Amino acid sequence: MTDRLLSFVQHPFGRRIARALHLPQPVRLQRRMDATSDRELAGRSVLTIAPGSVGPMPSLLAAITALGGGAAGDAPIQTLAIDATGCRDIAALRALFEQAQFAVTRLAMNARVLALTSAAMGDAAEAACAQAVNGFVRALAKEIGRRGATANVLVLQEGAASAESLAGALRFFGTDRSAYVSGQVLAWRKTPEAVTHETMTHETTGRAPRSRVALVTGAAGGIGMATARRLALDGLRVLCVDVPAARQPLEALAADIGGALLAADLTASDAVDELIDAIRRLGGLDVLVHNAGITRDRTLARMAPADWDAVMAVNLTAILTIDARLEAAGLLNDGAREICLSSISGIAGNAGQTNYSATKAALIGYVAARAIPLDARGGTINAIAPGFIETAMTRRMPLMVREAGRRLNALKQGGTPADVAEAIAFLAAPGARPLTGQVLRVCGQSLLGA
Ligand code: NAD
């Protein structure tokens, strides 16, 4: 769908008019959507600062070097890594202010800022100073959003700061793969196993290497199709599922990416039987993306029971049923990655969406609880909460609601299905093993639920 304002303000004349009318002036976001590589920072100018410390963690510098990042020198900074693990007192926060102020004047358009803080705090005063970094970065994200730049925080749990672990984070948060992710604060855990790029495309334990297998539900829709394509780029064999009415685009997609397909309504029990059989034939699942979802918007007073039931059936019951059947059949392979599509409506609530918001909030609770059993088998589960994404779902919104949804974020524009697909590919990759039970918002730092 065309964002006319975004196109209009790319021209100097359009920009002048927008400025005069006090309209938002979104910049065209720089995105990266090719296959994940080992040298994700190659060609990027990187600056690392470490307020409150003698210097940045050696492991952070090692991660940047391993990913091919170059020192910014006099060039505009494309990736700013802030080692804020030393921000434990007010003097260190003053150093954060000074060093970040110097860096921010040199930030390139579409720059990525990633701050690292430590979860291990000595006393309440130290905890306060660590939390101050979150507020600082979120506010900074809102300031630099008008330049297409983003800023996020990872709270490092004890033992999570190895070079390998930090490289996993920088691959996404330090590059244009996270173009529509901003203002996020996420816990980054220590993980027992080593993760390599090799294990991203192939399962290397056991006998002969085989392609990892992914299931994407709702694969004929905007986000689902982009996700299936993106996972295929990373070498996964993708089982694409959508309703029978979508068979044609589903067949075209599966043929295009060399995947398998199943045209079935996931709310029907015989469809789930078929799904389980198809997964068994593929050797079980390594990546499971619960993406199919519907809306049936009405205020609570006017909502028909059928609208409540339909949304519950697709957005929640189908997910719980599929997972229970997969577990019972032993078809979720060790180290599996599960990703549930939630929504900022599940965080903030949205008028006219009591049914939808309930299901999307449910998924947030679900991933938090299910992370524990999956972790024991080397797996992770997370929710992605998209904000306003340009798809068929948002095309159905009334004009003014759609326009407000697009602009009420730090980047002043909607995201694309590819932005969500990129976040899913990140969570599906071995480098994201430290992230589980959490919600990653792909919302351009939406004001809703902030
Ligand atoms: P979409 O309508 O383009 O795609 C959803 C797909 O799910 C469709 O192809 C549909 O046929 C399929 N589907 C629905 N019911 C099904 C069933 N019973 N069995 C099998 N497939 C079924 O929507 P989208 O925008 O791509 O959204 C994908 C997911 O992201 C949804 O869960 C949605 O709630 C969530 N989300 C989207 C946005 C957004 O702005 N687009 C925002 C927040 C969350």
Image (cartoon, rainbow, N blue to C red):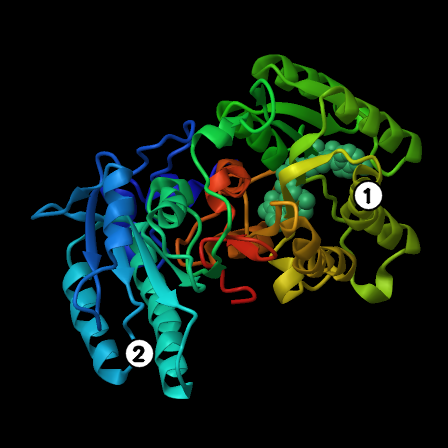
Question: Measuring 34% from the left and 66% from the top, which residue is drawn there?
Answer: 137
Q: Nearer the viewer, residue 176 or 235?
A: 235
The answer to whether the beta carbon of the residue marked 1 is less than 8 Å from any atom of ligand 1 is yes
Q: Nearer the viewer, residue 94 or 189?
A: 189
Mark 2 sits on what residue?
Answer: 88
Amino acid carrying mark 1 in the image: Ala
Q: In the rendered image, which quarter is residue 179 located in? A: top left
The answer to whether the beta carbon of the residue marked 2 is less than 8 Å from any atom of ligand 1 is no
Residue 29 visible here: no
Amino acid carrying mark 2 in the image: Arg
Question: Measuring 72% from the left and 21% from the top, which residue is drawn there?
Answer: 282
Question: Measuring 82% from the left and 43% from the top, which residue is drawn there?
Answer: 318
Mark 1 sits on what residue?
Answer: 318
Q: Position of residue 402 (x, y in %)?
A: 57, 51
Picture disc at residue 64: none
Q: Position of residue 17 (x, y in %)?
A: 29, 51
